[in-house]
Image: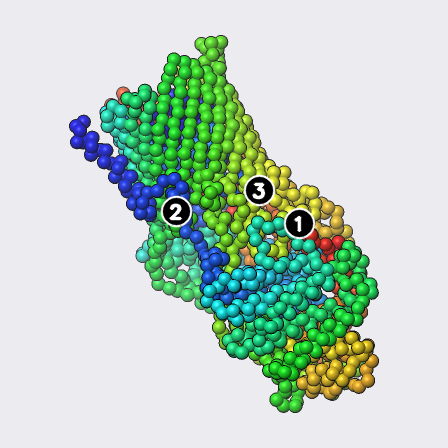
Amino acid sequence: MACLAAMLFVHAGLVAQPLQRDSLAFAFGEAVRGETLRKSSHPNPSNSVFGYLKGLYTMQSTDEYNGIDVSASFNLRGIATFGTATPLVLIDGVQRDLDNLSMVEIDRIEVLKDAVASALYGVQGANGAILITTRRGKAGFRVSADYSCTFDTPYRMPEFADAATYALALNEALALDGITTPRYSDREIGWFRDGYNRELYPDVDWQRMAYRNYGMSHNANVTFDGGSDRFRYFTSLSYSNTSGMLGQNDLFPQYDAQLGLIYLNLRTNIDLQLTNTTFLKVNLQGRLKETNRPGSSISSIVGSLYDIPAAAFPVKTGSGMWGGNNIYNTNPIADISDTGTVQAIQRSLLADMTLRQGLDFITPGLYAEATVAFDNMAFYRDQRTRTYQYESLTPIFDDNGMISSTNRVTMGTKTELGWSSALNNQRMFVMVKGTVGFDRQWGDHRVGAAVVYEQNSLIPNGRNSTRKRQSILGVVDYDYKGRYTVDAVVNYSGTAVLPEGDRFNVYPAVGVGWVASNESFLRDNRVVTYLKAHASAGLSGSDLFSHDLDLQTFGVTGSSYWFGSNNAEITGLKEGALPVVGLVAERSRKFDAGIDLGLWNRLYLSAGYFNEYRSNILVSGATVVSGVIGIDVPQLCEGKVRNHGVELSLQLSDRIGDFGYSLGGTFTYAKNRIINNNEGLKAEDYLYKKGHSLNQYYGLQSDGFYASFEEIENSPVQQSFGTLRPGDIRYVDQNNDGVINENDIVRLGYSTLPEIYYGFNVGLDYKGFSLYAHFQGVAHRNIYLNTSSVYFPLKNNTNVSTWYLNEHTRWTPETAATADLPRLTTEDNPNNFQKNDIWMANGSFLKLRNLELSYTLDKRTLRWADMRIFVRGTNLFSWDDLKYSDPENFGVAYPSMRSYTVGLELKF
Amino acid sequence: MNRSFKNRILLLPLGLLFAAMSFNGCSELNFGNRFLDQQPEQVGINLDTVFSKKYYAMQVLTKAYTTLPYGIPYDASPNLGGDLLDALTELSYSTLTYGGARKVYYVGAYSASNESTLSKYFFTNSKIWSGIRYSWLMIENVDRVPDMTSLEKNRAKAEAKVIIATHYSELFRHFGGVPYLDHATGVNEAFHYERLTVAETVSRIVTLIDEALPHLEWKESDENDNGRMTKAYAMALKLRVLLFAASPLFNSAEPYLAGEASDRHLTWYGNYDVQRWRDAESAGRAFMEELAASGVYDLVQPATQDEAGYRKAYHDAYFTRTSSEVLLSVRMNYHNNYASVFCGATNNYAKNQCPTLAFMRLFPMSDGSAFPEDFDWESGAVDPCANRDPRFYETILTNGRDYQGRKCQLYVGGVDRKDENTDGTGLLMYKFSQDYTTATSLGAVDSWPAIRLPEVYLSYAEAINEANGGPNDTAYDLVNRVRNRVGLGNLPEGLDQTAFREAVLRERACEFGYENVHWFDIVRWKNEAALRADIQGVNMYQDNSTPTKFRYAIFDIKPNRVWKDQWSPKWYLSAIPADEIYKNYGLVQNPGWE
């Protein structure tokens, strides 16, 4: 465990670099170096930390507007709340988003999650913290430059039926729905096959039409660092330009609709020793970012690519218009190319500065420090969009059933490019912090102590959601002979979202450590080179809920009455919900204990246990408060969750002659349990969510398929989800009441949030060649396969996937014995599309996140610079149960990317 | 480093500090609690500001009006999932696949744990209880408003009380004794609300009305106040509640069904007392005396004494917002909302409310005589729809009539009845929906007649009959007024108590088709026979040679409603939702639903 003083310094953003003193944090999976992260090719740094840090759950998320501007979401040690579980992210001690950084700026990322560390952040600490430290200059002068080029290909995409297969499937579905007239005649299906008339009987592979084979990105960085022992600087300039894999993006000369993501980051970090006792640190970062996309959002385009069957209409009709019809009312290719563009532009300036004055003249070791941070970001949207016309074609047949002519109807409206712009979002953050501290060694005793005052205010778009917080913090850490350590924190922390008088809470915590390897009996032991046992316990809080919950308000929405005989609308006043009584911040009680072990100075192992008890979580009051009070029932601060688990890490590195190798890994198991969620009385014991995981998967348990109408008719159990037909799912009557309804929903599988999260990496090098592989996986996770067209086919005019048709056996009268999926249907079929075990899949996966091969030529050879050339693959493989989609991205979304990168790095 | 450079460098932190202050959006930098007190600005206004001005205070009352019961669907989650209450009676049958009648009631899925918006009157429907709460907020706070006269304040309070009484009258008729909220619940209160007995519930409703009466106008003097609570409506509401209370469901020597709620007198009085009928009678008499004195209200009379004239009079009577006989017209919009949800193509609730053969037979002939028991359906020699009570044509849509710009084709094979197995009765509803389409109804004005004058006449007549062991001249006169308005002759003289009662109930069924009256008449008279009657429809076949000639075939609608085969008197009252009972705040389940 990084000692408390170290964390405090980091928190203060000080230059003292205590982590170098405590570099074992890297060995024990508490921190990861920037150069390790830079083995990933993703332009967004949040996508590089998968599995490197013990306890940090990083899951890929999707971008529904732009597709390629994706980031990852974080949780520390799973989740322990019904509310927001997002950890606090600090860059150089200031609350900022990791997404704003470029990879080259990062020196290290570490996670703070134990009781003492959480108490340091008071009312913001319960979800833990992620600390990012940016790079700083060292004396001398260095320049480095690198360039890399990445090819992105879709990692996995669902496959859909061709036109003839679709037509057969649709006819099958209609027949099984009891509709006797097929939608397509055999002759028409033949036309789909043989291409007799591609205008009326098309066979369009929409995904192939919509995408080109690859996307590309270019990344270039230049860094300078240097200075003297009094003045040091680090400057980086990074440029990244990614373009997506849309095809047909530049059909019109006015614009290019390709998905684009460009950013330019400029950072300067300055350290200045003003006097012997005065030290100044200034960090400045400016960012310009621009994204580009078609006028339609990528999620609606991908939705159309999934849902529109190959047989629906041609891309363009014979008269040169976009194809379309009144069922879908959209043409995905036209959505890409003919709807204009939307650009989102981010401009941000992040600045922070710390001035530290040594006050040794008062008493040795005393110092004072002031930090000011000021961030301002604006997200601006600039769009030029338009709509298009399309043509719907229907054949007219002659008496022989052959096409005699085509009926053409023009639909939609064509508009010219219209320009508009808007401020999408903004973020202003101001922090002021003052510290008076003391750090001194007396013989065997070292004592550090500090009092920190901090206030910060975060103004997002709309001042209504402004967050203000304030805290006064006292910390003491004591160390005896490097063997025994005690850390104590008392944080008096307040937030403006709580009612006046109750805004502040005290968050105390204490941690103890025993470094056994510094005891005489282990000193100089050649096997056990490091051994530490540590434990901590304490409180922290979370205030991530809405404003004004403690107040009752009236508003004037949607409550009019019409008195008199004329149309005189008289408005009424609507009452808001009753205020939350006794609103308090979520309270987290944490306990951690662990052992860190170093063997032969090469192999590092750690094991830890954590246990968190979160209380005061806002939960609904409606299940316990009478429904007759006539007003929305307030939430109650009565939710309770326990979350506990273990963390393990391993690191080994060694060198045998010219051959070097390293092996590293982390493993986290976290299991949460609802202690109280204010559930009302349930009809059956198994319906209570209490006692189970927060994201537990619930559904009906299937029991095969109904084979015949007789079986449905004579079934002792009535299923209450619509009319049944043969091939529909039969469910288990859990409570034996003869009815299948919501009272038969049971726990199935695991939670949708993985319980197990792990990562490992292997590095090998030999004479300038090196090979590095980074794996990451999750286990004990279940996901719900409800993606339209892919897993829920044909329903409401959607498409059908090869997953449904080929990978599995769907129910038909012939396959009734072996079927593992219900019959095809064109209807809503509320029975089959209930959440159940058929649509539940194992969400575990193990991914090869990065694989890199590089060759380094050092300065001695090249004379003017170190040079490294590398080839790298990102997201190359995944071992999982989902063949057709990424287990992290299985909904209607732009595909995840498998990337191939070549690059060159120079260090002068 | 020279000293001046150092000084300049020192300016940098100060400059950044200054920048932080000025961009923070505050004029000054605050520390400590003063900093946190600069809270994000609040949304909306609070109770004190609301009752500091008449303009806002009256909006609270307006909000209470928006919660009034409305018998036809108008929003996303109407009662009974869009079915009309009559669909549960023997007079109507719903084919709405997602409506409450079919999904919940006919099949027997209704239960205490299946109380929802598909129920006929969802106990925890927020409209009921929030309407009561807004009314109490008005009553409790209006005295604080500086710019209102005491006359205005008293009237506002009186209106609020009648709104509360209206909600309680509905709850009472669906559930019996219910929890009574006598103020707007505050946040720190213990939530404990026991059900009152039937006697207490009636007395609370009557007290609310009696307190309100002195401050209400008989009819609003300002035309812009049309739709507000009036003395006439309040008095009629009192009669409606007292009549229900006096009827055998509650006023009997035996409970309709044994159970804890019956033991506690939550679902009956505990005995029979003729005084309850007398109370209803005097409420009716009080109304008629006030009507005689103040006038204004009258049945809408026909302009011409022919079928068209009678139909027009009846149509205007229930349908127009400012009809002289609607005592309270409830509005949910200005323009006709059935356009989208009632008649419109998407939902088309109206087309799914099918009058049954029993309803068709119920209406007398235009001369006042009953429809023949032994009518010859098979030969089709006589048109069963010819020469009927004019209200028949305003309530039931039959073949050959003008409908949505064409002639209605209800014969088998026609547009409106594709084949003889199509779900339905062979008849369509005409009341309220009339022949509107989405397009044609757009401009029409929409309102719900909460109580019409004929209900007062017929209720008073019934109360006289029950309180005095038989009808008197007044009672006859009251019923005949209703009949004469549509050209039907007087009732035959010399009816005994039972025969007169049946005549009145039949008159009510004909007069108030789809106006949420018949269900309660069944319930309060414990009319098991009506609930268990066969539900039948009639198929009409066009003669191949003469297209104007038809023959008819009666058919049973299967499956039977659950209460036909598995009869229990529990169906008279609704179940209280199980999850409310589980909250343990003092509710007791109605008999049969435990």
Look at the image and tell me in which quarter the C terminus of chain B lies: bottom right
- What residue is at 78 percent from the left and 77 percent from the top? B465
Residue identifier under label 1? B583
Name the secondary structure under disc 1: loop
Q: Does A682 appear above or below B284?
A: above
Q: Is residue B344 left or right of residue A2?
A: right
Q: Are marks 3 and 2 in contact (CB under 8 Å)?
A: no
Give the Cα separation between the discs numbered 3 and 2.
28 Å
Instruction: Return the x and y of residue B53 as percentages of the image width and height.
Output: 46, 64
* Residue type pointed to by label 3: Glu
Q: Are marks 1 and 2 in contact (CB under 8 Å)?
A: no
* Residue type pointed to by label 1: Lys
Q: Is residue A383 left or right of residue B247?
A: left
| Of marks 3 and 2, the one in the foreground | 2
Name the secondary structure under disc 2: loop
Instruction: Return the x and y of residue A893 as percentages of the image width and height.
Output: 48, 48
- What residue is at 48 percent from the left and 30 percent from the top? A508
Q: Residues within 10 Å of mark 2 (few under 14, many from 20)?
A: few
